[in-house]
Amino acid sequence: MHKDKIEQYLSMFPEVSWDRWSGEDGDITIFGWIDRDDSYKDFCLINFTDNEPYEIYSSSAKYTDSFCGRLDFTHDQCKRVEDTFNVSNMIRLKKADMTKIKYPATQILHWPSGPVNACDEHAQGIKALGNFMGAHVISTKLDKPAECSNCVNESKGKDRVKDGKY
């Protein structure tokens, strides 16, 4: 591996904080992170063979075309995993359909057993219960639309009573 040559290529991308690499000799893959205006980061990955880049990938909508141009490569549009595959361990960026949210939560309560999405009314009750039990329950802003867990459970109970199942 010609370290100096690879360093020259990596220096062409000052927006990227290079992080990890893998491979042997001149056939290596290097990736790094690109800061964004929100709390997320984009990635950039360059594959090298014989110490020359032959592929570059980036999740950055802002920089991808520019990155490809710096290496005189063409840009292939990345596709979102959530648009094609259905797995639980994927990043979901699509907005929730608010018409399907019947009981909107306003905050996340950090209860000792885990996070709870809650509306303002239930949040007040959960905090009071936690305080009574000696637990410190804090709340944070919801990062995406969600149902109030307690409202949903209450509605299920009311439906069971209505249906004669209680």
Image (cartoon, grey):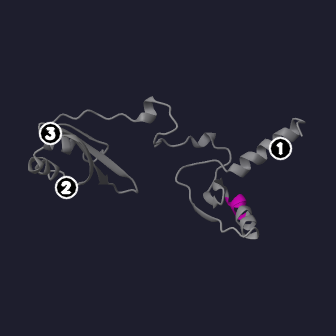
Q: CA distance from mark 2 to mark 3?
A: 22 Å
As helix, strand or loop, the secondary structure at mark 1 comes to helix
- Label located before the other in sequence (2 or 1): 2
Distance, label 2 to label 1, CA atoms, is 59 Å
Neighbours of disc 1 within 10 Å: few (<14), some (14-19), many (20+): some
Element assignment for label 3: loop
Residue at the spot of label 2: 14
Main secondary-structure element of the magenta-colored stretch: helix
Label 2 or label 3, whichever lies nearer to me, is: 3
Q: What residue type is disc 2 on?
A: Pro
N-terminal of the pair, mark 1 or mark 3, is 3
Left or right: 116 in relation to 15: right
What residue is pinned by disc 3? Answer: 26
Q: Residue at x 50, y 43 (%)?
A: 95
Between disc 2 and disc 1, the foreground one is: 2
How many badges with numbers are in the image?
A: 3
For image coordinates 54% across by 42% down, the residue present is 96
157 or 28, which lies in front? 28
Q: Residue extending furthest top?
A: 84
On screen, residue 72 above or below 135: above
Decide: marks 1, 3 in contact (CB < 8 A)? no
